[in-house]
Amino acid sequence: MAAKWTAADMPDQTGKIIIVTGANSGIGYETARALAHKGAHVVMACRSRERAEAAAARIRAENPRGELAVLDLDLADLASVRAFADTFTQQYDRLDVLVNNAGIMAPPQRMTTKDGFEIQFGVNHLGHFALTGLLIGRLLATPKSRVVTVSSGAHRFGTINFDDLNWERSYSPWKAYAQSKLANLLFTFELQRRLEAKGAETIAVAAHPGYTNTNLQRYTRSFSLLNKLLAQSPEMGALPTLYAATMPDVRGGDYFGPDGFMEMRGYPKRVQAKPEAYDPETARRLWEVSEQLTGVAYLDDVPAAREA
């Protein structure tokens, strides 16, 4: 891995179909932009068509080698997730990379998705769990495809509270966020175990952006000063995701983040999640609960995936 790897070091992506959720701003926007410049056909999966079309227009004005398409996706509504998957599979016969990027962070009051889930658990984890499952056929049919899920260093403060996953008894904005980001990693590593057991070429990997100045922090005004002092740009924050999505040395189960102090900023490198993220029993249980909550079941014909 290059010491100071940047988007310019990405291999050519011509001919690849790549979905980026939450691609209209922040890290998602920079991810979509960089991939398009490398020749990929990027599907920008966004909740607001107006903002997504505006973002696509800004990228197109730079004359990228690749193409951009906008499809509606509201991860807070499982019906929208299913509609997106239906539309995508009707229009595309392959999927090289699914970038599960969209997220919501620490709203001060408990909010719920259309299906009644606490919004961070519902959007950050369950929405992407369902989306991946509904697209798994296209992924498995595409040689060397990847699922890249964006987590956060905040996962280190998270626990999976199976007795109150949706924070109905009490709500803590940051604990709920940390739980959702730990869920992202448990999902990634369990997905990789199941893909390996199936003998699939598809791999599952994760990334985190470090401390990046994006509108994800819109609910936390205290970040405004810290952002100016400590945060890196969205272009830098997108690098671990881009590395995970494109580089040939990436292996299933890898996790990438910035190489600087406490993984807060810097260039991409392989990093380690906290030990609980690799626990197969917690991951198996979360997978089963996620299937029950979303109604989306996949890769369940792989009994070896339930083993360490």
Image (spheres, helix red, strand yellow):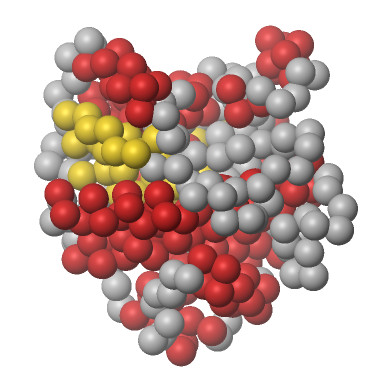
Q: Which residue is painted at 43% across and 35% down in the image?
A: 47
Up-down relation of residue 208 to residue 82 (above or below): above
Residue extending farthest to the bottom is 303
Image position of 21 with respect to 190: above or below:
above
Residue at image point 48% right, 29% down: 27
Whether residue 94 is visible here, answered yes or no, is yes
Q: Quadrant of the C terminus?
A: bottom right
Furthest-right residue in this view: 170
Q: Residue at x 57, y 56 (%)?
A: 115
- Tell me if I can see residue 202 in this picture: no
Return the x and y of residue 249 as percentages of the image width and height: 34, 51
Q: Where residue 208 sits in the image (x, y, percent)?
A: 56, 41
Tell me: residue 228, above or below residue 6.
above
Q: What's the residue at 17%, 29% (across, down)?
A: 67
Task: Tell me the quarter of the image containing the N terminus.
Answer: top left
Residue 196 spot, x, y in % from top left: 38, 75
Q: On the picture, is 176 further left or further right than 242? A: right
- Residue 108 location in percent, x, y? 79, 34
Of residues 243 and 172, the one nearer the viewer is 172
Nearer-the-camera pick, 211 or 47: 47
